[in-house]
Image (spheres, coloured by chain):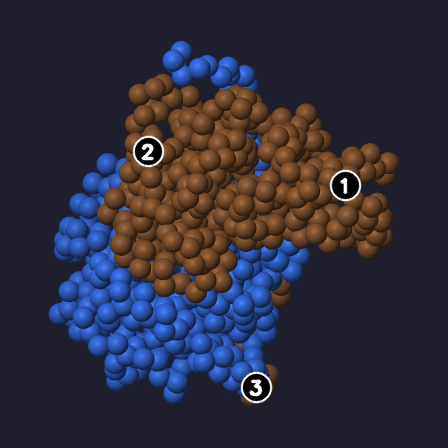
Chain colours: A brown, B blue
Amino acid sequence: MDNKISRGLEGVVVCETSISFINGKAGKLSYRGIPVETLASNSSFEETAYLLWNDHLPNRLELQELERKLREARELPREVLKVLFDLPKDLHYMDVLKTILSLIGALDWRNSKDLYETAIKITSILPTIIAYYYRYSNDLKIIPPNPSLNHIENFYWMCFENLEDEEFIEALESCLILHMEQGLNASTFSSLVIGSTLSDMYSCVVGALGALKGSLHGGANERVLNMLEEVGAINNVEKYVEESFKLKRRIMGFGHRVYKTYDPRAVYIKELLKSVITDHNDELYKYLKIAEKLEEILVNNPVKRLYPNIDLYSGIFYSYLGFPRKMFTALFALSRVVGWTAHVIEYTKNNRLFRPSSKYIGSMHKDYTPIDER
Amino acid sequence: MDNKISRGLEGVVVCETSISFINGKAGKLSYRGIPVETLASNSSFEETAYLLWNDHLPNRLELQELERKLREARELPREVLKVLFDLPKDLHYMDVLKTILSLIGALDWRNSKDLYETAIKITSILPTIIAYYYRYSNDLKIIPPNPSLNHIENFYWMCFENLEDEEFIEALESCLILHMEQGLNASTFSSLVIGSTLSDMYSCVVGALGALKGSLHGGANERVLNMLEEVGAINNVEKYVEESFKLKRRIMGFGHRVYKTYDPRAVYIKELLKSVITDHNDELYKYLKIAEKLEEILVNNPVKRLYPNIDLYSGIFYSYLGFPRKMFTALFALSRVVGWTAHVIEYTKNNRLFRPSSKYIGSMHKDYTPIDER
């Protein structure tokens, strides 16, 4: 056994995949060979999910079949509604998602043998949990799923009971497509480790939700907004950056383990945001300007260039659409669930239980001393 | 980046640890330098947990403090009881554990910042969830925690409302101590990956429970019993082994990823079992004899020696104590939770987010064709 420690498993190849490809140096990401920008511009959420799950874009029949399944699984079982609508109203959305999905999985044990079918059910149901908890915890009337709407329209509808802002919904769909898959990040890897024991798909996704909740993973765009708020005005940006370098304070929304240049998703979402944010008196327009200024300074930083990642603009974008900050990580989950489940399906076809090693640095022999001699 | 694929991460060292050491060739396992057999014979559940969490055996004051905390956290919050006692009675124990623990964590978000304190609370509460669901799902009266009892006595009490069989309880405690920690198996590794995002301890344990549920991990002793049942009589053992080799059917309870000789825990639990199983007319005594015969044949197998692992005898042992087969994996969790949480605490002190790589084998460029051309 090699005794080198692979910290964070950086650079360690754990499996083959044909789901997505990241070229970190060039700043490119493709799903099954198709650039994400193309998919964000042309494809629906359902089509893209089908592509990630199945390795080809669906024909009309295949798409209809998937859309039908996604629509049918949207409503929560009655026992689950009872639990959801009895929760305190100040919980973390990720805790709600995790608990309620785990409950749904517990009740569904007879019908969750098939990983792919279960992936579809889970993908269908996450938006409902999020929207219901949003409405319930804000004392708003619950809006049930509308079977005439597609996946993202329906989510928006369940949240806001409004379909007027068509360009918002379209932009949201593009943004979520960009979040759908990103290789073996920590949440996807969690679901893979759990899946490798041949556990069920609910357990994999519940584990991934727990990982996404972590502040080093899914919570970043929420913290970007807190930072923009702290900066407060475009004139403070330079000072904030200088101070951050001095204090070694991390500037949120910049840098990425894989991308060593512009994160292609950041570029795309910035344009999305600019296309929807028409009201220049809005507080969020000011935040956009602060973020752009930060980007300008940090990308041209002579010591170490820092490139914006997907989180720099996505938080402002979600806020402008009306989503509360507390919900951002759940929005991420709503989309990334496709990547998680696609990886579990792929990995378990050629499964190998994960069981890494550790280097023991403790004492080799310690005596068991009776308690009164300790 | 090295393009070799580390399947299942076998032999890949992901961190340093001083929690436990396995010598797979010699068949030895120690916790913090003390052989597990010594701990199983001399130490209590609480003492051993303290040792794993803190790197030394507790003195009397430290032990009292831990015992107090474990006692105080046993009862479930009222909102949680309501959900638990409204569940269907035919659920998988691991799904119940996962769901209820996730709910407890959701409600406890204000007080779960400290990983160690949360580890204690979770360890305290898992036995209650298991015992309550056992009693509830079997239409038995609920037995609340008894603060005058220690951790394992209290668990046994909540399950059976009986403390007469002292040697059973003592043997159970020894058996659970042997299950407490075993390096970076898949469930422990799941909790580490989740913890590496700086998520909360509940999320780590909920993820680990999902992994332990998998049939390649925690479910093995349940399947050993099914196998012993299938063999049925000691005279059938040789034929069963021959057939298994011919059909390439896996013989449950033998072989281990790490131990290449006797699993020291298997040796110990076999003796425990023999010490408690006094009724030789019991069906389970027959199973013990079948298991021993299997061991005799397989250890002396001229082609490939196969050594018994911990699961060969633990299932018979739990059955003899009166635990239903469906509960076995949950019993494992009740104990292994100490290892999971100890590793999360240790790893996050010198944290590095897990983010492995994969080898892309899909197509590099695919065109986005409109749906009618697919």
Quadrant in the picture for the N terminus of chain B: top right
SS of the residue at dot 3?
helix
- Residue displayed at 60% across by 70% down: B55
Q: How many callouts does the rendering have?
A: 3
- Do discs 3 and 2 share a chain? no
Please identify the quadrant where the C terminus of chain B is shown.
Answer: top left
* A279 relative position to B324: left or right: right
Q: Residues within 10 Å of mark 2 (few under 14, many from 20)?
A: few
Task: Using the rendered view, name the quadrant where residue A234 is placed.
Answer: top right
What is the distance, in whole Å, between disc 3 and disc 1 at their CAs? Answer: 54 Å
Closest to the camera, between mark 3 and mark 2, is 2
- Three-letter code, disc 3: Leu
Q: Whole-percent x and y of residue A305?
A: 79, 36
Residue B252 vs residue A68, the one in the foreground: A68
The residue carrying mark 1 is A294
Residue B214, horizontal then vertical, whole percent: 36, 49
Q: Is A110 above or below relative to B319?
A: above
In this picture, is A66 found above or below B62?
above
Q: Residue at x 39, y 68 (%)?
A: B126
Q: Is residue A361 above or below residue A208?
A: below
Q: Secondary structure at mark 1?
A: helix
Q: Residues within 10 Å of mark 1 (few under 14, many from 20)?
A: many
Disc marking residue A148: 2
Observer-nearest residue: A242 or A304?
A242
Name the kind of residue labelled 2 in the image.
Ser
Tell me what residue is drawn at x 65 percent, y 32 percent: A274
Q: Position of residue A368 (x, y in %)?
A: 54, 77
| Chain name for mark 3 | B
